[in-house]
Image (tube, grey):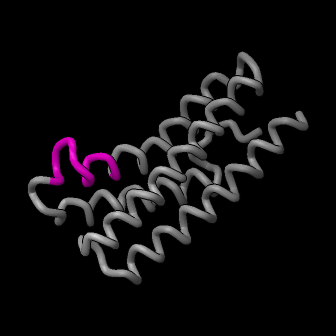
Amino acid sequence: MVSDVRELNVFRRAYDLSLVIHKASLDFPRHEQFGGMADQLRRCSKSVCANLVEGSARQTVSNVEYRRYVTIALGSAAESSLWCEYARDLGYVEIAIAASWIDELAEIARMLRGLKKHLSSH
């Protein structure tokens, strides 16, 4: 396994996307900023990375624990995708931008499933 989870392509892609989403969400309406959709979207997009880091740190205990955190990261990616749909449908982001985020989250989810499978075989 990689010694630093930050070296994994899935981590880098999730991290980069979370930065893009964070910056874009700052332009959402004021009422969505704190406790609203912007806040939720920022939290769950960052949660993908946070869970990979936490799971990796627990890898010394067992791959079972790491797999559990990868599963949580998968859930965060799915939640992020839903919030992107809301942002699109409410007109907070352009349709093409939301589509690119949703596509990237689907690819991140695919990569997370691959990581989970890899951890199951070791």
Check the picture and name the quadrant holding the N terminus.
top right
Which image quadrant: the C terminus?
Answer: top right
Residue at horizontal 64 percent and vertical 51 percent from the top: 8
Residue 101 appears left or right of 104: left
Magenta residues span 32-41
Name the residue at 54% across, 68% down.
Answer: 104
Left or right: 60 in relation to 95: right
The structure residue drawn at horizontal position 90% and vertical position 37%, both measured from the top left corner, is 121
Q: In the picture provided, is 38 more to the left or to the right than 104?
A: left
Is 57 covered by the magenta stretch? no
Above or below: residue 112 compared with residue 98? above
- Which residue is at the far bottom? 96
Q: Residue at x 47, y 50 (%)?
A: 79
Residue 41 on image: x %, y %: 34, 52
Residue 93 falls in image quadrant = bottom left
Specify the quadrant of the image occupied by residue 38.
bottom left
x then y, percent, for residue 6: 56, 45
